[in-house]
Amino acid sequence: MSAIQYVEVGGAAPYRIAIGPGLLKAPALLAECLRGRHALVASDGNVAPLYLHRVEAALRAARPDLRLGRLVIPPGEGEKTLGNFAAALDALAGLGATRDACVFALGGGVVGDLAGFAAACWMRGIDVVQLPTTLLAMVDSSVGGKTAVDIPQGKNLVGAFHPPRAVIADIGTLRSLPPRELRAGFAEVVKYGAIVDAPFLDWLEAQADGLLAGDDALLAQAIARSCAHKAAIVERDPFERGERALLNFGHTFGHAIEAEQAAGSGGYGHGLNHGEAVAVGMVLAARLSTALGLAEAGDGDRLRTLLARFGLPTALPEGLEAGALVARMRLDKKAQASGLRFVLWDGAGRARVVADIDEAAVLAVLR
């Protein structure tokens, strides 16, 4: 096994992120997360056939006495529902999980969010270990303790803050990702350069070809650097009362796009995926920043060019009405009674939260 890179997340509930190839086959690494004798491995129909038996075998090798259960939900954003949340609770009940039990969330952001929320609620909170298998989950949703499910009115509106006991990112799983899903993850990687680390954008521009080709060393470096930025922000603001909101750069537009496309097609998972919607959202946020006189247009052009180089969309999909998108934004968790609130920027690496933005300016950018 190659050397493991570690990122430490501090604060009131500290934990460690382990990054490297082959980590799902490391019994000691998985077993050191266990405190009791019950464990539930949650996954989805795409990931489970590839990796579930590997994780279960590693856990049993390290802990023969472990009572091990499994939950496999159908794949897709449309499955991050209250119904599947209830199924996770039923699985924990069937296992007889006690307060020292552990949930292993094996998959992308949907599984991580849903299984993490179930762990947050079972007996008022048990351990969850995030085993992300997508780039998007490795650099974003698995880190920071945000857990949630979607409802028809919007994404992630029902959830809880519940930090994981550990995050174990086996970058070997990225080889099984469809190219579109790998590209989607780079939207969140680029985001860290956009909000706090302008030199990271230089590095991504220089290494884009190797990253897209799946170079393990480059991927590990990009993941570790992204996680280090998120860890530092989360440690300073665990409940998103200030600086952590910067991590939502592009997400107010992106979530509105996802919700509106879901409403028009019968559920989440149709149209742009999350990373693609965030990519478009970042371009729109940069454009709004320029319209408000905060940033130069050239900064937004550079961001758009970099996202396009990673194969990501940079324009609003056809068929979405600007007024409907703004209505979605009013329900966004970042909105306030006084008006819309966005994460904007003053240029590369310099993001900030701007409140009370005139809806007319947002409509103009969308149109």
Image: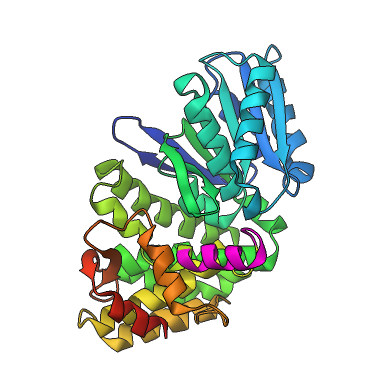
Residue interval drawn in magenta: 256-269
**Which residue is painted at 74% across and 42% down in the image?**
48
In the depicted structure, whether residue 270 falls above or below residue 80: below
Count all numbered tags in the image, as a single digit. 0
Does any portion of residue 214 appear in the rendered image? no
Residue nearest the viewer, comparing 309 with 76:
76
Evaluate whether residue 350 shows in this view: yes
Q: Which residue is drawn at 40% across and 79% down?
A: 303
Q: In which quarter of the image is the C terminus?
A: bottom left
For this view, does 241 lie left or right of residue 160? left
- Quarter of the image with the N terminus is top right
Tell me, what colour scheme is on the image? rainbow
Q: Nearer the viewer, residue 44 or 208?
A: 44
Residue 159 appears at what percent x and percent y?
A: 45, 40
Q: Nearer the viewer, residue 324 or 213?
A: 324
Residue 90: image quadrant is: top right
Q: What percent of the width, then of the height, locates residue 315?
A: 50, 82
124 part of magenta stretch: no
Image x and y of residue 209, in percent: 57, 75
Quadrant hosting residue 41: top right
Magenta-drawn stretch, dominant element (helix, strand or loop): helix
The answer to whether residue 82 is above or below residue 293 is above
Q: Residue at the spot x=44%, y=78% of the render?
A: 322
The spot of residue 252 in percent (x, y) is 39, 64
What residue is drawn where x is 55% and y is 75%?
A: 312
Question: Is residue 308 rendered to the left or right of residue 342?
Answer: right
| Nearer-the-camera pick, 251 or 366 | 366
Q: Does the magenta stretch include residue 266?
A: yes
Judged from this view, the residue extending furthest toward the right is 49
Q: As drawn, is 17 to the left or to the right of 334?
A: right
